[in-house]
Image (cartoon, rainbow, N blue to C red):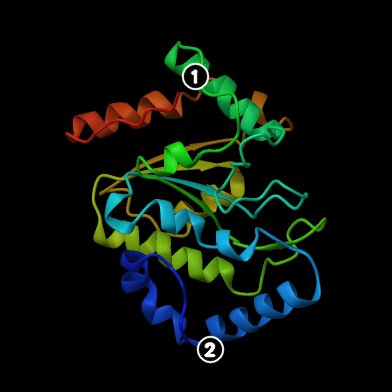
Amino acid sequence: MEVQIEPSWKKVLEPEFDKPYFKDLATFVKDEYHSTTVYPKPADLFKAFELTPFNDVRVVIIGQDPYHGRGQAMGLSFAVPSGATIPPSLRNIYIEIASDLGKPLEHNDGDLSRWAKQGVLLLNATLTVRAGAAGSHQGYGWEHFTDMAIKALSDKREHLVFILWGNYARAKAASGLIDRTKHLVLESPHPSPFSANNGFFGSKPFSKTNQYLEEHELEPIDWL
């Protein structure tokens, strides 16, 4: 089966494409796109991989599934297209960046492509969702596929930073997918308004990430 995904990622993930679970997943997703409204649009399905090739990844931020409202999902976790209303979780992320780095943000939109192009893999565990139905494509195989992407990064790369917000993302490290002896794992509550005040604010993931990268002679991320 031909999967249109960035070449370096295709090479790493190719063994998955012929497995029964992925064939079933592809059939399910194709049928969903044909029968109902699904986000993101097909051209953005693998956007995170497209903007951040395998060997360029320096940081991984894991989300759960795409936004399910119209005009929000763009294939990057936590991000929305330029001009869209910034969701509450991303607004709290921006608040923490400004506080952590002690500088005002230079951007006032939710398009995080600027991070992705610097090596921040903005990966949702589930890559598609039915309009208006959060979590509707969970349990069909996406989670296994994205777990294999995370495992490949952990196994084949060194000195990456995995930023895990909330219990869902933190479970990826707890399950043994990420080798803590090779990489930095930063964990905190989710930036959602329901939990941001319980330890997300003040966790300083952005300065900690850059400090770690610089200690390993890697370029820091311009988060602003």
Q: Is residue 29 left or right of residue 142?
A: right
Residue 105 x, y percent position in the rendering: 51, 18
Q: Visible in this render: residue 55?
A: yes
Residue drawn where x is 43% and y is 28% of the image: 223
Percent x, y of residue 51: 42, 51
Q: Position of residue 79 (x, y in %)?
A: 59, 41
Number of other residues with Cα within 10 Å of mark 2, as a class: few under 14, some 14 to 19, many 20 or more: few
Q: Are marks 1 and 2 in contact (CB under 8 Å)?
A: no
Whether 213 is drawn above or below 106: the answer is below
> Which residue occupies 32% across, 28% down?
210
Q: Earlier in the sequence, mark 1 or mark 2?
A: 2
Residue at x 45%, y 87% (from the top left corner): 18
Q: Is residue 201 visible?
A: no
Please identify the quadrant where the C terminus is shown.
Answer: top left
Question: In this rendering, which labeled residue sits more in front, label 1 or label 2?
Answer: 1
Q: Nearer the viewer, residue 185 or 209?
A: 209
Of the pair 56 and 60, the residue shown nearer to us: 56
Mark sitting on residue 221? none
Percent x, y of residue 67: 70, 49
Write down the residue under mark 2.
20
Amino acid type, callout 1? Glu
Task: Report crowding for label 1: few under 14, some 14 to 19, many 20 or more residues within 10 A (C-alpha).
Answer: few
The kind of secondary structure element at disc 1 is: loop
Q: Nearer the viewer, residue 162 or 68?
A: 68
Q: Label 2: state its secondary structure.
A: helix
Residue identified by numbered label 1: 106
Give, as a three-letter code, the residue at label 2. Pro
Distance of label 1 from label 2 (alpha carbons): 46 Å
Most extreme residue toward the left is 217
Q: Residue at x 31, y 73 (%)?
A: 11
Residue 73 left/right relative to 8: right
Q: Is residue 59 above or below residue 157?
A: above
